[in-house]
Amino acid sequence: MINVQNLTKRYGDLTAIEDVTFNVQKGEILGFLGPNGAGKTTTMRILTCFLPATSGTASVAGYDIFEQPQDVKKHIGYLPESPPLYTELTVTEYLRFISRIKGIERKDRTEALTRVLERCALTDVRHRLIGNLSRGYRQRVGLAQALIHNPEVLILDEPTTGLDPKQIIEMRQVIKELAGQHTVILSTHILPEATAVCQRVVIIHKGRIVAVDTPDTLSAQLRQSEKIRLTLRTPSPETAEALKTVPGVVSIFQEPSTDGQVFMVECELGRDIRTELAAQAVRRGWGLLELTAVKLSLEDVFLQLTQEESKQEEPKEDALNGEPG
Ligand SMILES: Nc1ncnc2c1ncn2[C@@H]1O[C@H](COP(=O)(O)OP(=O)(O)OP(=O)(O)O)[C@@H](O)[C@H]1O
Ligand SMILES: [Mg+2]
């Protein structure tokens, strides 16, 4: 349904995305996961024909984004980062206006409107001014305008940003229900969101794709180790060495801290060594202040992926840097 081949976009010296290649199957929800500035919006704007690429090719719903942009736009619904809503119109007025400019025939407009109002849970607020709606409801209006012409493909740029937890759950539910009938690409910088909503995830970092897989496989691959944060009031100079001898410990590194000394203990996956660490800390009188299992953050995921990438691609550079450990 969506085919992206070697897309690159440069702004002068700055490469926003480089050599981006992926596919989305019909009916699938694909997550585009990456931190700020990764190139998510750039990719989405190229696929929706709002921005020309520097090189590469892509097709959406069978149409080439460079040769047939009008056809692509007809088959796509796009929710931009900040949807351009007309705040002085009511929800119904605005959506009727959109249905007209999207070329829905007059006789079909009321049905289309009723359908999206219901689907996006907007029926109750349909006569209110958009300018008076809360952020979450405006986001739903944004989704409604993307859906109104019942497009095969939906491109949603951070659809849950700025919503409260309840609205996030509702928005995710709406998006999940689109799967099957619609093909969806949604961007997010939140790992659990990608896991909760998407069947497959593309991780993009600094404009390059670093991984494409199902959420389960990705997290299994990425979680080859676990980390424990150990804060000690009175460690000895030998503490780091002593910690390394605890069975299951892979590595230790110290972090600066104002309250005690923080040791990050990386240990083998599935091996809970917290009790052993606590026992050691007490026995040796290190003044145990805190002991917590650290969840793998998106940053850790990226760090792991990008480090692995540079190891594979540029083995010499690692050797040159010569970082100990
Ligand atoms: N018009 C532009 N001119 C110059 N550089 C740009 C322009 N638009 C985007 N960029 C740069 O391209 C890179 C990718 O930006 P993009 O907006 O695609 O990231 P993103 O993944 O959507 O980030 P965010 O999570 O913050 O929305 C960034 O380094 C950004 O500064
Ligand atoms: Mg963006």
Image (cartoon, rainbow, N blue to C red):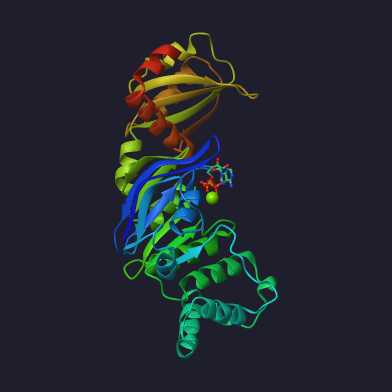
Most distant residue in the bottom direction: 107
From the viewer's perspective, is 126 left or right of 314?
A: right
Q: Quadrant of residue 47?
A: bottom left
Quadrant of the snapshot with the C terminus: top left
- Evaluate whether residue 324 shows in this view: no
The answer to which image quadrant residue 295 occupies is top left
Is the N terminus in the top left, top right, bottom left or bottom right quadrant?
bottom left
Q: Residue 70 at what x, y percent from top left?
A: 44, 67
Find residue 5 and report its horizontal and vertical position in percent.
34, 48
Residue at (53%, 59%) from the top-left corner? 160
Residue furthest out toward the front: 67
Instruction: Out of 123 and 101, give the one closest to the viewer.
Output: 101
Q: From this viewpoint, is residue 22 visible?
A: yes
Tally of numbered tags: 0
- Image coordinates for residue 110, horizontal then vertical, percent: 50, 88
Quadrant where ligand 1 appears: top right
Q: Is residue 202 left or right of residue 121?
A: left
Q: Which is nearer the eye, 48 or 167? A: 48
Left or right: residue 93 versus residue 35 is right
Closest to the observer, 118 or 46: 46
Depicted 252 relative to depicted 95: above or below? above
Q: Residue at x 43, y 22 (%)?
A: 279
Residue drawn at (32%, 61%) of the image:
28
Is 191 drawn above or below residue 172 in the view shown? above
- Compared to residue 122, the image places residue 221 above or below, namely above
In the displayed structure image, the side of residue 13 where residue 24 appears, left or right: left
Image point (31%, 49%), residue name: 214
Viewer-proximal residue, 243 or 269? 269
